[in-house]
Image: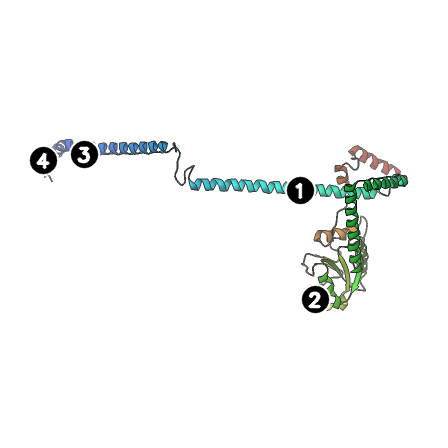
Amino acid sequence: MKMVDPMDALAPMRTIKDEGPAKDDREKSVSEAVQEEVENRMTKAAEELKQKYARGEGGRDASENGPTGAAYTAAAVAERERRKGIKDAERAEAEAKAQKEAQREADVRYQFAADQGGSEDEEEEPLEEEDSDDELLNELDGDPELAKLRNMRLTQIKAEQMTKMEMMRKGHGELTEIVQDEFLPKITAAARCVVHFYHNDFHRCKIMDMHLKDIARRHLDTLFLTINAEKAPFFCEKLNVRILPTVISFFNGITKPDQRQIGFIDLQPKAGGSEDEWPVSALEEKLGKIGVIDYVAKATEAELERYGLVQKKSIYSSRHNQIRGEDYD
């Protein structure tokens, strides 16, 4: 280390002057080293790029996470599958909705045709209809293929009649009174069963029985039973029957808490009627929602208009009818 005389005022300046060339040499060496490193990296990059082109990879990034790497490809495939899954789900939902709408339209048209079946216009020409049926049957007899279809249909009708008779033999089609010992064998033997727990002194239980008898006649696939709650304390306790009437739905002997009708809850009465005066369709709809019967909701005026079965009413005609009604009052 070079010693400096502390009493010499010009010593620091002479020291800087003496070290000037050495400092310049060091800075020059660092600059050259940086330049050399940059040149080496550029040369290496150019060589790697040249090799890629030689292999036919061009300027693509072949690394794991690059645009052509395995990880990137897997992510792209997963994203395509995700989008495809979303589109498939949307398509399935749209198809299900269209199928449901088509089924509803068919049900509405069938109801409308059934309601119109008793009109006077159709009763005027019964003989012509019978003649046309006879002619059609004669044509079927002459065509082997059509005759085959006819025989298949007759066989199907016969099978349906046999099934219906078998169901009626088992008690379907009516409301059957049972005792406690019959309860389990009955509900476990039926695929779908409705049981009404009643009390002899309760007027509302008699109303419920009346509507259930009506529903039972129209839904042969379901077994309808009624049991005196006073004489079935065990099952009332097990099924938590606390309010009468209570109507419980069973599927192969199994029920859930939301598969029952307690009292007259949610059974909307007729317009201007009391709480006990509700239509049978209210209970029928409730049982249909539970799934214990096959229920088709009655067609609304809006549905009849939508499917072109009735003419749409204009606002003017509605107001005009209201005014006329007021005049007559």
Q: Contact, CB < 8 Å: mark 4 with mark 2?
A: no
Front position among marks 3 and 1? 1
Q: Which residue corresponds to mark 3?
A: 26
Mark 3 or mark 2, which has the lower sequence index?
A: 3
Q: Residue at x 50, y 41 (%)?
A: 79
N-term-proximal mark, 4 vs 2: 4
Give SS at disc 2.
Answer: helix
Q: Type of residue at label 4? A: Asp
To which residue does mark 2 refer? 237
Apparent side of residue 80 relative to residue 175 in the rendered image (left or right): left
Q: Position of residue 126 (x, y in %)?
A: 89, 41
Among the 4 quarters of the image, the one containing residue 25: top left
Please tell me whether residue 3 is drawn above or below residue 215 in the rendered image: above
Gap in angstroms between the C-alphas marked 4 and 2:
116 Å
| Image coordinates for residue 135, horizontal then vertical, percent | 85, 39
Q: Is residue 300 visible?
A: no
Query: Could you tell me how far apart the alpha carbons at marks 3 and 1 are, in whole angstroms?
Result: 82 Å
Residue 136 falls in image quadrant: top right
Q: In terms of sequence position, does the residue under pointer 1 or pointer 2 come before the other? A: 1
| The label number, if any, that marks residue 8 in the structure image | 4
Expressed as whole percent of the image width and height from the top left, the position of residue 278 reads 79, 52
